[in-house]
């Protein structure tokens, strides 16, 4: 079956991948997907397809999928601030763009488009060529917004200042309520309802690893606990946490939104991540615990 006529999705993280499946269901259309190879990405692709995600094609990719982007009428993009996207958008100037959720980086992207922040990733200040590409890509996206051809598909509330600001510029906002994820849930059997989410903040240098381990230990000391490592946690750090008494490490190889969907009555804590917001939508209201 030819798939060239379907909108193209370009995703670089498991959460973006889940958002693509949600968008296909929300819009009632088939999508062709290219995904960046990385931790959890092949497993997430297989799981989404097993659950019936409406993907006309789904293939891994390294680098910029120039040929696929060139013939696509609409780009559905997971990382609107990546250097690869900025280059592709500046060169090819897509006819329409939908921006998928990329966790809290979506807020930064919206703020950058609205002029509330620099149009760049905070950990990668734009200089030289990257600054030029960012300026060209931003200008093109704002032109698309002015003609109703730029959209955000996000779980964040449209009332947030960042999204209210881009809405005023003509950006269309579509709500991601994770209805497809809940409908296709395949809940696992966990040894306990008490769950600690792993974090990328240690790997990013934003949280001391000993401090994080101590926080996990304090929670585990209060009762049996399951720990779900973040895909970017170092194996040595996970091994150290695995040694804590009263704690079981479970490595599902999937984003927590897919893995935990369908479970009720969970008590979940984390060290702060976008999963705090996504799980609030994925899980039943009674099943969302507090975040540390």
Image: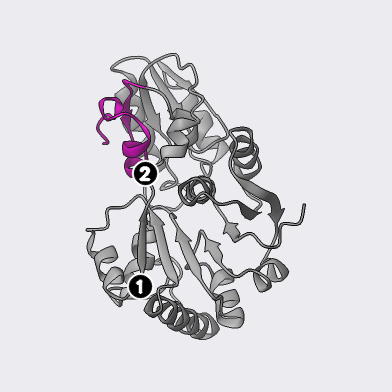
Residue 18 relative to residue 103: left or right? right
> Which of the image's four quarters has the C terminus?
top left
- Quarter of the view holding residue 116: bottom left
* Residue depth check, mark 1 versus mark 2: number of the one nearer the observer: 2
Q: Is the residue 13 above or below the residue 240 in the image?
A: below
- Quarter of the view holding residue 90: bottom right
Q: Residue at point 63% right, 59% down?
A: 6
Q: Residues within 10 Å of mark 1 (few under 14, many from 20)?
A: some
- Which residue is outermost to the right? 1
Q: Residues within 10 Å of mark 2 (few under 14, many from 20)?
A: some
Of residues 196 and 178, which is closer to you in this image?
Answer: 178
Q: Is the residue 211 above or below the residue 242 in the image?
A: below
Of residues 173 and 83, which is closer to you in this image?
Answer: 173
Q: How many marks?
A: 2
Q: Residue at point 31% right, 76% down?
A: 169
Image location of residue 177, percent across then percent down: 37, 44
Residue 2 relative to residue 134: left or right? right
User: Which span of residues is magenta-colored?
Assistant: 264-292
Q: Which residue is mark 2?
A: 177
Is 28 included in the stretch rendered in magenta? no
Image location of residue 97, percent across then percent down: 50, 68
| Mark identifier at residue 112 | 1
Q: Residue at point 60% right, 75% down?
A: 88
Of callouts 1 and 2, the N-terminal one: 1
Image location of residue 137, percent across then percent down: 49, 79
Marks 1/2: CA–CA distance: 24 Å
Q: Is the residue 120 above or below the residue 25 in the image?
A: below
Q: Is the residue 114 above or below the residue 257 in the image?
A: below
Of residues 254 and 29, which is closer to you in this image?
Answer: 29
Is residue 39 visible to the viewer in this orientation of the structure?
A: no
Q: Coloured how? A: one colour
SS at mark 2? loop
């Amino acid at each position: 079956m030819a798939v060239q006529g379907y909108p193209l999705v370009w995703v670089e993280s498991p959460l973006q991948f889940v958002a693509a499946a949600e968008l296909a269901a929300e819009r009632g259309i088939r999508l062709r997907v290219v995904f960046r190879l990385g931790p959890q990405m092949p497993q997430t692709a297989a799981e989404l397809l097993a659950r019936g995600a409406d993907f006309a094609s789904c293939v891994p990719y390294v680098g910029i999928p120039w040929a696929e982007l060139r013939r696509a009428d609409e780009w559905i993009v997971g990382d609107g601030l990546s250097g690869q996207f900025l280059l592709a958008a500046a060169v090819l100037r897509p006819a329409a763009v939908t921006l998928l959720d990329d966790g809290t980086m979506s807020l930064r992207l919206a703020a950058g488009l609205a002029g509330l922040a620099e149009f760049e990733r905070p950990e990668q200040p734009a200089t030289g060529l990257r600054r030029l590409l960012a300026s060209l890509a931003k200008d093109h996206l704002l032109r698309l917004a002015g003609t109703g051809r730029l959209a955000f598909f996000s779980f964040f509330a449209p009332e947030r200042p960042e999204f209210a600001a881009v809405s005023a510029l003509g950006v269309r906002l579509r709500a991601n309520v994770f209805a497809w994820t809940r409908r296709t849930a395949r809940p696992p059997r966990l040894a306990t309802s008490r769950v600690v989410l792993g974090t990328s903040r240690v790997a990013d240098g934003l949280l001391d690893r000993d401090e994080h381990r101590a926080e996990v230990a304090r929670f585990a000391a209060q009762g049996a606990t399951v720990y779900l490592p973040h895909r970017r946690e170092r194996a040595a750090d996970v091994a150290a946490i695995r040694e804590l008494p009263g704690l079981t490490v479970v490595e599902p190889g999937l984003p927590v939104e897919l893995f935990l969907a369908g479970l009720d009555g969970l008590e979940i804590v984390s060290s702060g991540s976008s999963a705090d917001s996504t799980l609030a939508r994925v899980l039943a209201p009674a099943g969302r615990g507090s975040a540390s």
